[in-house]
Amino acid sequence: MDEEYDAIVLGTGLKECILSGMLSVSGKKVLHVDRNKYYGGESASICPLEELFTKFGAPAPDESYGRGRDWNVDLIPKFLMANGSLVKLLIHTGVTRYLEFKSVEGSYVYKGGKISKVPVDQKEALASDLMGMFEKRRFRNFLIYVQDLQEDDPKTWKDFDPRTQNMTALYDKFGLDKNTQDFTGHALALYRDDEYLNKPAIETIARIKLYSDSLARYGKSPYLYPMYGLGELPQGFARLSAIYGGTYMLDKPIDEIVLGEGGRVIGVRSGNEIAKCKQVYCDPTYVPDRVRKKGKVVRCICLLDHPIPNTKDALSTQIIIPQKQVGRHSDIYVSVVSYTHQVAAKGWFIAMVSTTVETENPESEIKSGLDLLGPIRQKFVSVSDYYEPTDDGLQSQIFISETYDATTHFETTCLDVLSIFKRGTGEEFDFSKIKHELGDEEQ
Amino acid sequence: MANRSGAAQRPNGQTQGKICQFKLVLLGESAVGKSSLVLRFVKGQFHEYQESTIGAAFLTQTICLDDTTVKFEIWDTAGQERYHSLAPMYYRGAQAAIVVYDITNQDTFGRAKTWVKELQRQASPNIVIALAGNKQDLANKRMVEYEEAQTYADENGLLFMETSAKTAMNVNDIFLAIAKKLPKNEQNAGQTGNNAQGRRLTEGDTGPKTAGNCCK
């Protein structure tokens, strides 16, 4: 460890692993350390099942749960948008070679006490009970407008300036009712609250495009999920970093981040060893005095021995409960994966219900999500703070990621990573630095 | 759109006989010659002063066996074994492993035994394991007796050969021996049975693909 590095990365969560990979690829000498014995930090998938029960102080699972090793339970629920930034990163870096994915089977939205499938094509849209006949026609016109709109071509804007006029104005232009607005903003644009209504419409338009472009890739839903759980993602990027020369040390406690003149980082100390470096990249847990609390998320992991009612026995699905439907300010998300993703023993399902905490009693806030699941064999509730760095890191050269938020996908994760990389290196990540011939996959 | 890049990357056409694809992982202490063995097998090259593994972490090579083409997808450790930081992903779905030690270094043989135990704990139960005593060209500095390693291999059901990446001795042979021992019917070539696999993502990829299984 007593060497000099360009960058030391602390924590092997997904963001740190992507950063580590990008830095190594860019020719930096990287040391990547985790205090835990395993990869992934907060974004690990817990295996075996016994460890999950221990983590939450529950008595060991009985034999009905099958082999403990067949389980890989995520602590943070997320899906990948099939056309989103993480998929692009995976493909450009070649990390996709180490992973296999399945499409999530369907997406549902909660309305008036029951769930309806988010339509994926014309036929489903016509049959959908989400809106009446005339509303469907208006909604169709709206979707066509969004699809055809190009931000750099004002001819496609049709008497509307999406850069200055807000989303409410666009809804009004098409005469969409409140229910359709709710559905569009939360189930397609994936906003967690209604602040977007007052922001320029172009932001929402971009999100709807991402949704439909993702949907177009594999058909059933816009989402993908990796076999063996989300914990595979950090491992894949860590491997990329290692291939480009990154050094890995797990199970290594970090005792101090050593500062030099002007509060600039000069190294990292573990016991008596000091590794010198010019920069540190880390998650908030390594620098509690350099981050501030931004909010709280409540998450409930539910183990089920049956699929979710009213989802046509889907082996994976997402249900969005828009805030207004249950008198809240932020949406509740339910994500479901199962044995088919090699994350649970045969016949088992894992549902995760989560939302941003708004009250003193977080568990009661997710009740409407839990009520959709049918009988729950075991549930584990956690309430965790999420943090953001107090500064941009330029002075100290300590670049800190934000804790994973309550969004259902990785778009904000990637934005954070790209922003940190740019702050740390002064340049945008250059994908062409990846030597594709290293792959040699097909000969 | 799907077919354009999809077909280019993963030929579906029936060529000679069937093609079976297997994931093979390398294990062993640093500097025993893991990367050199692969480089010799895949490219027929040897570098006396091979750097610690950088950038050679995913190679493929095919072997023809009677009517079957066996395609190895070879995973190198990328140096992550150095501080006991190999990820579970590395072992995941591996159908074969070569555990390498250096015949001039007794410690590396001891470590090889630990890797075998690790494989028995982490990898799939049907994995085919081969033990390679590398650097056979340095037999005059031998510290691990051939018989000792052979006995250990027999007791643990491992294939065993002494190899030399430098002279190419037994390099192709050890891969060939593994290829022969691997199950080649469709049922067994997958990892954990039907429907176990998902899809790989590629650029411009649309529409479902058949599982990346045996005999496409």
Image (spheres, coloured by chain):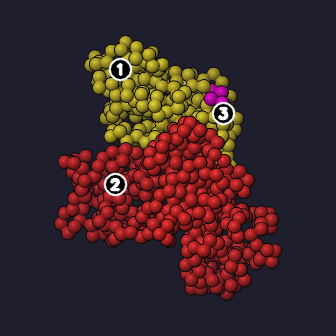
Chain colours: A red, B yellow
Q: Quadrant of residue A344?
A: top right
Image quadrant where one finds the C terminus of chain B: top right
Amino acid of disc 3: Cys
Q: Chain of mark 1?
A: B
- The label number, if any, that marks residue B1 in the structure image: none
Real-space CA distance between mark 2 and mark 3, rounded to the nearest whole angstrom: 43 Å
Residue A404: give x, y in percent of width and height. 46, 62
On the image, numbered disc 1 is attached to which residue? Answer: B136
On the image, numbered disc 2 is attached to which residue? Answer: A10
Amino acid of disc 1: Gln
Q: Main secondary structure of the magenta part?
A: helix
Residue range (magenta): B184-188
Taking the magenta stretch, the answer to whether it contains residue A111 is no
Left or right of A386, for residue A99: right
Nearest the eye: A304 or B56: A304
Residue that appears at 51% across and 59% down: A299
Above or below, B201 against B124 in this view is below
Disc 2 residue crowd, few under 14, some 14–19, many 20+, Cα 10 Å: many
On the image, numbered disc 3 is attached to which residue? Answer: B215
Nearest the eye: A242 or B94: B94
